[in-house]
Amino acid sequence: QVQLVESGGGLVQAGGSLRLSCVASGRTFSINTMGWFRQAPGKEREFVAHISWGDDSTYYADSVKDRFTISRDKAKNTVYLQMNSLKPEDTAVYYCAAASWRSYSYTRTGDYNYWGQGTQVTVSS
């Protein structure tokens, strides 16, 4: 099993920045890829970004490309999501996820088998 704990959410004005953290524990050696998803009220959970545990390659949703950066600290088993130029439409609960199996894209919720509890990000206009 892998446990994930997110932190770093909060309230920020439009144009501001936040950095989310996700600490992984347990069978971290089984992780293949980690990702961030978000879910706004009344909407489905959507993909934000993912990072390969093997070579640190990254991939982003078009809606956050050039504004968000995913990265990780191997020694701390921690993944970060640096969010800049935040917009009100970025308001959502942000979830960290880990996949221990191989997938074609890692952009779907079903590609991941471990999830954190979520952290709220609210961007005011």
Image (cartoon, rainbow, N blue to C red):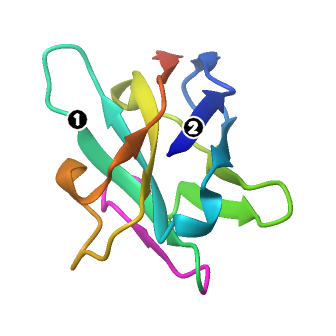
Element type where label 2 sits in the image = strand
Name the residue carrying label 1.
Answer: 45
Residue 68 is covered by the magenta coloring = no
- Whether residues under marks 2 and 1 lie with C-beta atoms below 8 angstroms apart, the answer is no
- Which secondary structure type mostly characterizes the magenta part of the structure? loop
Q: Residue at x 53, y 55 (%)?
A: 67
Placement of 41 over or under 17, stated as above or below: above
Mark seen at residue 106: none
Q: Nearer the viewer, residue 6 or 32?
A: 32
- Residue type, label 1: Arg
Name the residue carrying label 2.
Answer: 4
Q: Quadrant of residue 49?
A: bottom left
- Inspect this view and state whether residue 76 appears: yes
Marks 2 and 1, Cα distance to the nearest angstrom?
Answer: 17 Å
Classify residue 58 as left or right of residue 20: left
- Residue type, label 2: Leu
For disc 2, the neighbor class at 10 Å (few under 14, some 14 to 19, many from 20) is: many
Where does the magenta region start and end?
55-65
Residue 65 placed where, x, y %?
43, 62
Classify residue 52 as left or right of residue 63: right
Query: Along the polypeptide, which appears first: circle 2 or circle 1?
Result: 2
- Inspect this view and state whether residue 65 appears: no
Element type where label 1 sits in the image = loop
Q: Residue at x 30, y 62 (%)?
A: 62
